Image (cartoon, grey):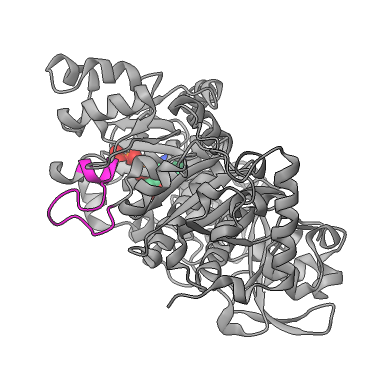
Amino acid sequence: MQHAIGAALQPAQRDVIRHSHERSATFGLCETMRPDYAVLSGTELAVKLDESRALFAHALPVMETLYAQIANTHSMIALTDASGLILHSLGDDDFLARAEKVALRAGALWSEEHQGTNAIGTTIAERTAVTVHGDQHYLRANHFLTCSSVPILDPHGNLSGVLDVTGDRRGYHQHTMALVKMSAQMIENRLIASGFSDGLRIRFHSRPEFIGTLMEGIAVFDLDGRLLCANRSAQFQLGLELGALRSQTLDALFGERVDELIARAGDAPCRLELHSGVAVFASVDFHARNMSSVPSTTSTIPARERAGSSLADLCTGDAQMNDIVARVRKVIGKNIPILIGGETGAGKEMLARAIHDDSPRRAGPFVAVNCASLPETLIESELFGYAQGAFTGAAKRGAIGKIVQANGGTLFLDEIGDMPLAMQSRLLRVLQERVVEPLGAARAVPVDFMLVCASNRKLRERVAQGEFREDLYYRINGLSVTLPPLAARSDLRAVVDKILRHERFAGRVVYVDDDVLALFARHPWPGNIRQLSNVLRTASAMLDDHDTHIRIEHLPHDFVDELGEQPTFDNATPPANVARLVDIEASAVSAALKAHGGNVSATARALGISRTTLYRKLRV
Ligand SMILES: Nc1ncnc2c1ncn2[C@@H]1O[C@H](COP(=O)(O)OP(=O)(O)OP(=O)(O)O)[C@@H](O)[C@H]1O
């Protein structure tokens, strides 16, 4: 359905357009002039993308979803930074070709200063959602367009960029703006989720069924109960703007103390009363990974932290691991690719995640691709993506590749040694030129990511055998570290305790007996930490409710059988269930004394020792 927008124009909107036209004139623009069609070079655009990497990373999947809803309507979606520079666009081929003619493409600036009244530039000037239709555009060259733009705010309330849908003016649809607004809200919520992963997060709404939807309010507080950020819905429901909310506390806004709410984290939604008296349903999460202090109620928090989520967590006492972490820390944030070696299950992916989480790109995505588990035919599309109709059987709208998905964050290529040679050449080009050309696409997409690769095969040998490109090997090998196998680590006890603490396989934190640990110390662990984790999981399932420790009888039989002999114990750690000699002697003496009615001479005779010796033993 098409509408004549002019007739429906609200007075406020009319004022927005009038003011914008006035500004355009003061910029020295003339309606009939040829617009500024300059676009940034690929390298310049890559720098801009890097500056807005969190926005780009979180907007990209939302733009894909939005496009699914407006495909085939002769339109396009554009994402700009806060200055109006288009960072990325996607849309229908026919319209993209027309849009390119007026520089509606990545690298072009659509501020009012450059293009006069237009939805992107006017949204930036007015900090509000704006539709600019047909001849409301200041420049005649843009009169064939209809554009709907919404500002995207970062979690601190600053303008981060603009999301825009532009189409042929004849195809204007009144629902477009609602879709763009919802998409912008989605991006803002994602920015909050990644920027404020720590803290007490309350998701609330007066209707419980709206929790988990775009309608929910999201407010994050620190451990002192100060508000850190709140999305638009939260601001609306609380009746205050972000600036005013910042001076409020959890207690003042929700009538609850931090520790009371932390205790309810992870439970079903609870009822809270807002300061206005309105009752809401609230779902509470709490994460304190990087927080300096945690209230005493933390022990009751059901939400689990992710094990080994930062480099510091990986330092559990093994000197080789400490050395690896120290070396990795030196290159983090310096655009140096890291190559992780090590046996299967030794923790390569965990190290890669920790590197990401401790890097300046932590707000961006962490995208892992296992090159060994993908069939050769799929690696290409999985990694590089493909354009609409690129090949028979391709998804109608094309697919975004993992490399583009990793933009702004970290790309982790696991088992890179298994990447087919043809893909190695394409990957090398991406790493050299920092652009990706999706299969069948006309244009390259600039990308910026930190690269971490892992291999449990000896990559050098594969290079020597001609199975891995030497130039790629040197590209990915900025810093090379090799994780020690579990059997060679000196911190087995700490690793076991950490897994049991984080995973809570038994639904609670349990421990291992010393004799189990002694058995573990003799095991070769071919599956390394993954195998250890599996053994602990199975053993935990064998525990009775009152058991606090995993004992040998709880271990999987095949695991004990693997050792091929009865467990023996080393001298340094006497197993707890073997009594000490002095204790055996003491109980024999007391039993004999009891049997002889406390008569020392008779007891000494019965034990075959002198009375003096018996007295000495009784004093021990
Ligand atoms: N330092 C650690 N502390 C606790 N758990 C760990 C640690 N390192 C690894 N793990 C756990 O061990 C398992 C295997 O780890 P990961 O997947 O990182 O190994 P990998 O070397 O990448 O394995 P593969 O080569 O088979 O892909 C995971 O469940 C992970 O959570």
Magenta segment main secondary structure? loop
Question: In this orientation, which residue lies closer to the viewer: 205 or 152?
Answer: 152
Q: Where is residue 384? Give x, y as percent.
A: 28, 40
Is residue 293 shown to the viewer in this render?
A: no
Q: Quadrant of residue 419?
A: top left
Whether 162 is among the magenta residues is: no
Question: In this orientation, which residue lies closer to the viewer: 17 or 567?
Answer: 17
- In this view, the residue farthest toward the front is 32
Q: Is residue 440 above or below residue 127?
A: above
In the picture, the quarter occupied by the N terminus is: bottom left
Left or right? Give the position of 435 relative to 545: left
Q: Quadrant of residue 593?
A: bottom right
Q: Is residue 597 above or below residue 322?
A: below
The residue at the point 55 percent across, 20 percent down is 330
Whether 388 is among the magenta residues is: yes
The residue at the point 53 percent across, 26 percent down is 332
Boundaries of the magenta span: 379-398
